[in-house]
Image: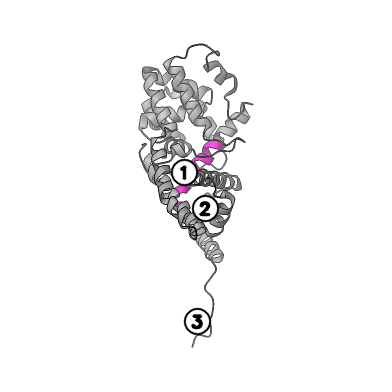
Amino acid sequence: MNEFASSPGIDPPSSTLSARLRELAEYLAAPAAGRLTEEQRALSLGVARRLVADVAARLDASIDPDALWAEWIRGGLPGAERLAGLCFARAEEHRWREQSAQRSAQPLLAEADDAVADVPAVGAPLSDVDRAYLALRIADRRRFDALGNPGVAVADLDGDVFRALLLDIAAWRLAEVSTDQARAARLGEAVRTAGERQAEERGIADAANDYSAILGDGVPDVAANAIARHNWPVLIALAAAAHRRTYADMALALLTAESAALPSLLAPLRLDRTALAPLEASLAMLPARAVGDGSGKDHADLSPSGHDER
């Protein structure tokens, strides 16, 4: 008889222990694989927390986002797989832009003198190109909170991802207000209203498409200028529009591409090979970048959402 046989009286492992063992098993299965740094983990977690708070506010302004987050972070975020790629893409883009801003001694949210030079003087009439560019910059600004921390704008979410997160938050809220039948009944209507509102909003992908369309044959020159000035939001936007992908998908594809893959990835922008040099150098200097492994996967497989733009 095996004296070490499990007794029916022994409690099953805790969720914490199970998670630790799962993490260790993943590490042992691929010990040489790159792991998240503490900075990447903190940034991605912050993006997720701000997104959850923003969606909760859409559902019910009286929801305590700190209580919601505290409970979810203890038990695990529902639909974590849906959010992981989205939050990681936003966090990596933020690291890249912050590094570029630090190296050029420019503030992250305002491309300093270059940005000012692109904006007409107050009172001057705006051209169609100016209007489209400013709309793109405004859409980008919505992806930061008041303190400059990165986030995901609700308007930029894929509709299915937004609805799933909305329903997860509604389920949590229902458990809180289940004794109040009137408030519980209003949750269903709130979910419907929030979904309709989000579907009508225009996000950064829409602004990117408009900007690319208005530039027309000028796209290659603007894209080359964006690379030279490290204006990565404009480059990502134009590439996303050319590939008909979401902004987040395109950002992640760029950030995980090998240098040799950049010419083909950006081929629709019709850039000279020499114009890519600052982009290659900037990406190469980003610490702990999740570079593709050369397995031949299509860039769409690296996307956070797996969906085409709305």
Residue 219 location, x and y as percent? 40, 21
Picture residue at 57% right of the left edge, 18% below the top:
116
Picture residue at 48% right of the left edge, 30% below the top:
139
Q: What residue does disc 3 label?
A: 8
Q: What residue does disc 1 label?
A: 86
| Residue 84 magenta-highlighted | yes
Left or right of 289? Residue 128 is: left
Specify start and end residues of the magenta stretch as a single range.
79-94
Q: Which mark is residue 140?
A: none
Residue 274 location, x and y as percent? 46, 23
In terms of secondary structure, where does tag 3 sit?
loop
Task: Please identify, in this view, whether the residue under mark 3 or under mark 2 is nearer the observer.
Answer: 3
Q: What residue does disc 2 label?
A: 32
Q: CA distance from mark 3 to mark 2?
A: 38 Å
Residue 188 location, x and y as percent? 41, 51
- The overriding secondary structure of the stretch rendered in magenta is helix
